[in-house]
Amino acid sequence: MKQIFADEKFNTQFHLGAVNSINWARILAQITYYFYSYFSLLRQQQTTEETPASAAETLQVQYVVPTGNFGDILAGYYAKKMGLPISKLVVATNENDILDRFFRGGRYEKNSVFGDESAGGEVLDGVKSHEVGAKETLSPAMDILVSSNFERLLWYLAVECEATGSMEERAQQAGEVVRKWMGDVKGRGGITVSGAVLNAAKRDFASFRVSDKEVYPPTFSYALSDGGVRHLRRLQKFTIKSSTYLTPTLP
């Protein structure tokens, strides 16, 4: 899809348009979710506080977001940069855990090994994965290896950690850095970023990986009893929220 939209001649002829997860207008709309949920929670907190102002001064929130193409949680990142008091954005991944591996160790790669080492794929959670394709899981909307919107976050990290000079110069340098990174992901199967880049990413993000085996009991029965399997994408969120990873004192 990105290649089609990048084809200027094709776009001129057919006037393409799509409100998918890489469309900037969609991310703008998703930013409002975070502000709406924050102020809804703030109103609830104010009903139990002695003074309304005290809740606003102390309320910090953390969001757990099931993600495949990194669009919704990127909107949360923008909301935080706009001033929303978000303590942490937690990336919830399924067995296609490329994002979890990045936030844990700074290696952004299609598999835990890449290049010649990944020939023939590997077996994780009973599902065989290959460098050329994602695993099939119970949450197919999240079965993505290279997330389109993640490139946008990489650009901000590159501006902060890999560039120097004026803002205009740093923006241009960051673009070249990300171009090289994504070229290596496509050509070599992965990259390893510097410690500075990883630490900058961890300042705002954390991550967690949930396998199909962890999702299936007991949350699968919840999805079926609610009228179908349309909620499977959300089940990663429920599993992660029950873990001890999140700061227990924060909503």
Image: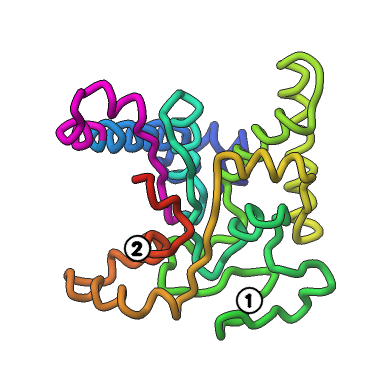
Identify the residue at the far right of this view: 116
Quadrant location of residue 96? bottom right
How far from the left and from the top, in percent, is residue 98?
Answer: 62, 60
- The x, y position of residue 56, in whole percent, is 31, 26
Q: Residue at x 42, y 62 (%)?
A: 240
Q: Which kind of residue does numbered mark 2 sit on?
A: Phe
Near-viewer residue (181 or 37)? 37
Tell me what residue is drawn at x 62 percent, y 46 percent: 3
Mark 2 or 1 closer to N-term? 1
Image location of residue 155, percent across then percent down: 67, 35
Q: Which quarter of the rendered picture does the C terminus lie within?
A: top left
Q: Position of residue 127 (x, y in %)?
A: 56, 82
The residue tagged with tag 1: helix, strand or loop? Answer: strand
User: What is the CA distance from the residue labelled 2 to the residue labelled 1?
Assistant: 25 Å
Residue 105's place in the image compared with 219, above or below, is above
Res. 165 image quadrant: top right
Query: Which residue is labeled 2 in the image?
Result: 238
**71, above or below 157, in the image:** below
- The residue depicted at 25 percent of the width and 37 percent of the height is 41
* Residue position marked by numbered label 1 in the rendering: 129
Q: Is residue 142 above or below residue 56?
A: below
In this picture, which residue range is highlighted in magenta? 42-66
86 within the magenta span = no
Q: Amino acid at mark 1?
A: Ser
Q: Which numbered marker is on residue 143?
A: none
Residue at 50% from the left image edge and 53% from the top image edge: 91
Q: Is residue 46 magenta?
A: yes
Q: Residues within 10 Å of mark 2 (few under 14, many from 20)?
A: some
